[in-house]
Amino acid sequence: MLNPSLPPTGRVLALLVRHGRTSLNKKRVLRAWEDVVLEPEGEADAYIAANKLKIYKPKMVYSSDLKRDSQTAFIIAEVNNNIPYETDYALRTADMGQLSGMKEEATRERVMQWYQNPSQPAPSGESFNAFAKRFWGFYEPKLNLARDVTAFRPSVFVSHGRNIAYVDSSYRGVPPEQGRMPFPGGIAVVRANMDGMETLDFLAETEAIMEDV
């Protein structure tokens, strides 16, 4: 976990922020590519996250083009001295096709199958492998930029619980369905350590990805 007594800016590479709350979070449905805006509580989530990020002096914000992500990213960029921000389709959560908009409890078994059979797409959607390739294909080069260029360190990635849980599972070496994510507006920190290894730490409580499919 973060030690606030240590200066964070020299070794923090990336800050992963889950977008703020929407009306579909309240309804406990699978959001996926449903393009909903932030609720007032979600805007508050974004402002709280933005102010927490100030200590890290972020240099760049990336988000998907979905409204809930881009709204959160804009608030973060604005609060942090109007730093540049960029939107890209690649940072979207997984396309769950016909499962999108259904109640979470009704989709839980199908989502687990989606994880455990990574080459098989969701109905009218994409496979886990396709999602992972799309997301990681954007994330890793931007992370490399933050590794190599001080002017991009740290970078903020505003995305979804599923994306952050995938990064968490990659760092911990566990199956993706065992990944963890912060609650809406929560933050994870990717840090380069003195031993040359990188770690991911959450700044607050987390939930398992299968608790919020």
Image (spheres, grey):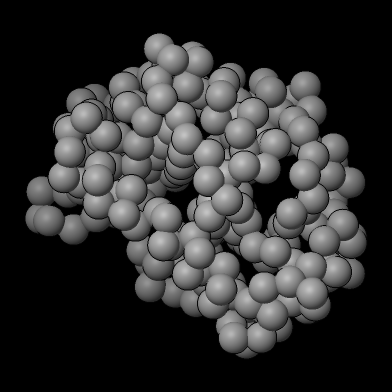
Closer to the camera in the image, 204 or 37: 37
Q: Quadrant of residue 43?
A: top right
210 or 157: which is nearer to us?
157
In this rendering, position of residue 146 left or right of residue 169 = left
Q: Quadrant of the C terminus?
A: bottom right
Picture coordinates of residue 140, whole percent (x, y): 34, 57
Where residue 33 sits in the image (x, y, percent)? Answer: 74, 54
Quadrant in which residue 47 is drawn: top right
Residue drawn at (89%, 61%), measured in percent from left and top? 102
Rendered view: 76 above or below 199:
above
Nearer to me, 12 or 95: 95
Q: Identify the residue shown where x is 54% and y is 77%.
A: 129
Q: Residue at x 57, y 44 (%)?
A: 64
Instruction: Give the vertical position of 142 relative to 83 (above or below).
Output: below
Vertically, is 67 above or below 104?
A: above
In the image, 16 versus 71, the foreground residue is 71
Is 62 displayed left or right of 192 in the figure?
right
Q: Which residue is at 17% across, 33% downward?
A: 150
Q: Quadrant of the N terminus?
A: top left
How many labels, in total? 0
The x and y percentages for residue 68 are: 69, 36
User: Picture quarter containing residue 154?
Assistant: top left
Q: Percent x, y for residue 70?
A: 61, 34
Q: Could one spot residue 176 in this view of the protein?
A: yes
Query: Horizontal placement of 156 versus 71: left or right?
Result: left
Q: Is residue 206 visible?
A: no
